[in-house]
């Protein structure tokens, strides 16, 4: 399976206001392994940055003045991603901008979803870590991905970091009990617990202090997740 980790940088937050893509970064995975094959391109947006956007990326119109326009690189970019599954953090943002860039070139270019499948790593992170911050920086910290060199947003750097984050997020089926044949055979060799012959299982008692701490933690989770947490649904 071929996957492309993709990130873009833009002149602002909304393509509907005329904002454009100024940088594209891609990292290729084959069967979940980085191939070393990347795509990186700066673009001349032919418009000003919105306030604050240039500071986030560290880019300037002076730097981008001699860079190609999206029309100049569209075919090469599409050839790199065509047929792949794109992994994007907050995919709606990047796909919206890229669809707009394609639309500006003409209807014959179609839309991104006609060329690729898209998986949103932000949605994956929210499923795994509900009620927590799931920005790329937060996930790097939580999953021990080194991002100390990330002083500014850069499309290729962010794609490389997201690659590591995504592999952490989606790895480890064996960690939750879906291991390979060796693990399965080892598990099958273990003697089964028999309540009739081995007596009652030990009972665990909880102190009043522990109960208070538990309820306090649940209250904090409910506040973050909209008055409900996974524990509440399991306790029904």
Image (cartoon, grey):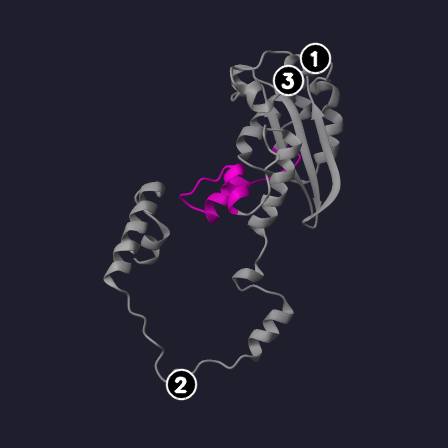
Specify whether residue 196 is painted magenta: no
> Disc 1 on helix, strand or loop?
loop
Q: Which mark is residue 104?
A: 3
CA distance for labels 3 and 2: 72 Å
Residue 124 seen anywhere in this rendered image of the structure: no
Residues tagged 3 and 2 counted as in contact (Cβ below 8 A): no
Residue drawn at point x = 69 percent, y = 23 percent: 42
Location of mark 1 (residue): 65
* Residue 5 appears left or right of 79: left
Instruction: Residue 10: give x, y in percent of width and height.
Output: 59, 22
> Disc 2 on helix, strand or loop?
helix
Instruction: Residue 138: give x, y in percent of width and height.
Output: 50, 40
Q: Mark 3 or 1 closer to N-term?
A: 1
Location of mark 2 (residue): 198
Crowding at mark 1 (Cα within 10 Å: few <14, some 14-19, many 20+): few
Residue drawn at point x = 29 percent, y = 47 percent: 219
Outermost bottom residue: 197
């Amino acid at each position: 399976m071929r996957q492309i980790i993709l990130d873009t940088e833009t002149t602002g937050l909304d393509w509907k206001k005329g904002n454009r893509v100024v940088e594209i970064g891609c990292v290729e995975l084959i069967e979940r392994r980085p191939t070393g094959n990347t795509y990186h391109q700066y673009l001349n947006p032919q418009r000003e940055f919105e306030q604050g956007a240039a500071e986030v990326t560290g880019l300037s119109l002076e730097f981008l003045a001699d860079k190609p326009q999206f029309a100049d690189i569209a075919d090469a970019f599409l050839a790199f991603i065509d047929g792949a599954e794109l992994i994007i953090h907050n995919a709606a943002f990047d796909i919206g901008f890229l669809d707009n860039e394609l639309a500006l070139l003409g209807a014959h270019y179609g839309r991104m979803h006609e060329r690729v499948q898209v998986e949103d790593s932000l949605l994956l992170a929210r499923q795994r870590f509900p009620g927590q911050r799931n920005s790329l920086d937060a996930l790097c910290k939580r999953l021990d991905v080194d991002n100390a060199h990330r002083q500014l947003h850069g499309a290729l750097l962010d794609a490389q970091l997201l690659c590591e984050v995504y592999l952490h997020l989606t790895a480890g089926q064996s960690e939750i009990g879906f291991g390979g044949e060796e693990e399965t055979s080892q598990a099958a060799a273990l003697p089964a617990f028999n309540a009739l012959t081995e007596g009652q299982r030990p009972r665990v008692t909880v102190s009043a202090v522990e109960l208070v701490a538990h309820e306090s933690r649940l209250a904090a989770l409910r506040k973050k997740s909209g008055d409900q947490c996974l524990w509440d649904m399991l306790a029904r």
